[in-house]
Amino acid sequence: MPLIEKPTHATMTPGFNFDAIKRHQKGLVKLNVGGIATPFYYVNEVVIEGQPLKVEGATAFLAEGVAANEAAKVIGLAMQMTYDAPTGHFAQLAEYNFANDTSQSLNGSPIGVLMGAGYAKTTNYTGDVTFGDPAYLDATGKILTADSTTGANGLLPIVFEGEGSDGDVPVTIRFDFPVVV
């Protein structure tokens, strides 16, 4: 009986284009070194992951975004992004959920706020950051390394522990926010 050789597919290359596939990039990831993820604050405005938040007013557990000169009022960073479906600010496709997307509708449900002292990774920064740079508050809710308009009023209790540019890669930050209960 003659031997029949199996065809080899070693030269076959599948036509996948992984560069075209876009995954959801988390804007804030708590690392296992310190920090408290508090799950009971809620917001009434669209926020992005890693956006600094404050607590003001008489409404219990209502967090708000901060202005560029309100860094001293920051209690922590938003661990979830929010979206407002009725006005068309969809953070994700309506009614679809993705495994690594923790977006929350503005329906009064709580979002996580990262407080305390510890380490996290964030893409919510603008400008070029390098190891040891202090973080300042931007008027848009992003953090940056230098802002001559806010000066000390915009200085956050955050130090960059990595390098990146305009949120292109997650950068490790060291933070020390007050714990508010």
Image: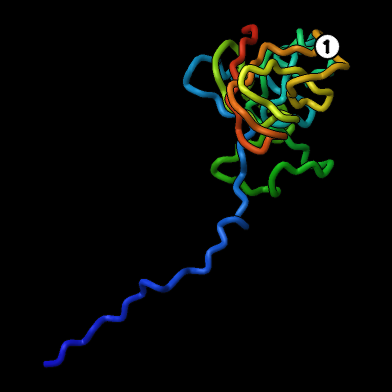
Answer whether residue 181 is visible to the viewer in this image: no
Tell me where residue 157 appears, x and y as whole percent: 67, 11
Depth check: give the residue in front, 152 or 130: 130
Q: Amino acid at mark 1?
A: Gly
Tell me where residue 103 appears, x and y as whole percent: 65, 36
Answer whether residue 161 is visible to the viewer in this image: yes
Q: Looking at the image, which residue is at 78% across and 19% down?
A: 146
Tell me where residue 71 appears, x and y as whole percent: 77, 12
Q: Quadrant of the N terminus?
A: bottom left
Among all residues in the image, which is located at the extreme left? 1
Q: Looking at the image, which residue is at 57% across and 28% down?
A: 29
Q: How is the image coloured?
A: rainbow
Among all residues in the image, which is located at the extreme right? 149
Residue labelled with disc 1: 151
Q: Looking at the image, which residue is at 54% across and 43% down?
A: 99
Q: Looking at the image, which residue is at 63% across and 20% down?
A: 160
Q: Quadrant of residue 174?
A: top right
Q: Is residue 18 left or right of residue 65?
A: left
Q: Residues within 10 Å of mark 1 (few under 14, many from 20)?
A: few
> Looking at the image, is 1 positioned above or below residue 150?
below
Q: Is residue 119 left or right of residue 13?
A: right
Tell me where residue 137 appears, x and y as whole percent: 77, 19
Depth check: give the residue in front, 32 or 179: 32
Q: Quadrant of residue 18?
A: bottom right
Q: Is residue 82 left or right of residue 29?
A: right
Q: Quadrant of the C terminus?
A: top right
Depth check: give the residue in front, 28 or 154: 154
